[in-house]
Amino acid sequence: ETTMGVITAVGVKALRVRYGSTFASFDEQIEINGIGGTPFSKPGDSGSVIVDYATKRPVALLFAGSEGNIHTFANSIFNVMRQLGIVRFIQG
């Protein structure tokens, strides 16, 4: 399935995400909200690639949602590529 959303914040700092009984803090994240009251993501969507609607180019990698899935949080694709040593995506 696909969903549409709007980036509502970039550079989000001190984002606390609960993993079981512990919390992790993340900086420089992207916040996305769904359109028309529909959540942008659901539980289990972590790891999904978020693409630009017009160009279909990767923008971010989804990793968390807020309580009630009001907000979705993602890592910038540029940060992901840097961390994984990816130079470029191959166009298919």
Image: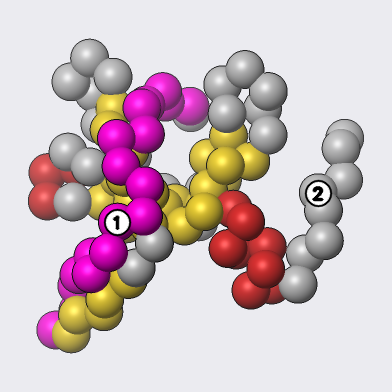
The residue nearer to you, when weighing 62 against 85, is 85
Q: Is residue 74 left or right of residue 55?
A: left
Residue holding disc 2: 89
- Callout 2: 10 Å neighbours few (<14), some, many (20+)? few
Q: Main secondary structure of the magenta part?
A: strand
| Secondary-structure class at tag 1 | strand
The residue nearer to you, when weighing 48 against 25, is 25
Do residues under tags 1 and 2 come within 8 Å of each other at their CB atoms?
A: no
Residue holding disc 1: 12
Residue 7 percent coordinates (x, y): 37, 34
The residue range painted magenta reads: 2-21
Q: Which badge, 1 or 2, comes first in the chain's sequence?
A: 1
The residue sitting at 12% across, 44% down in the picture is 68
- Callout 1: 10 Å neighbours few (<14), some, many (20+)? some
Residue 60 percent coordinates (x, y): 53, 48
Residue 44 percent coordinates (x, y): 37, 53
The residue sitting at 68% across, 23% down in the picture is 55
Q: Is residue 25 left or right of residue 2?
A: left
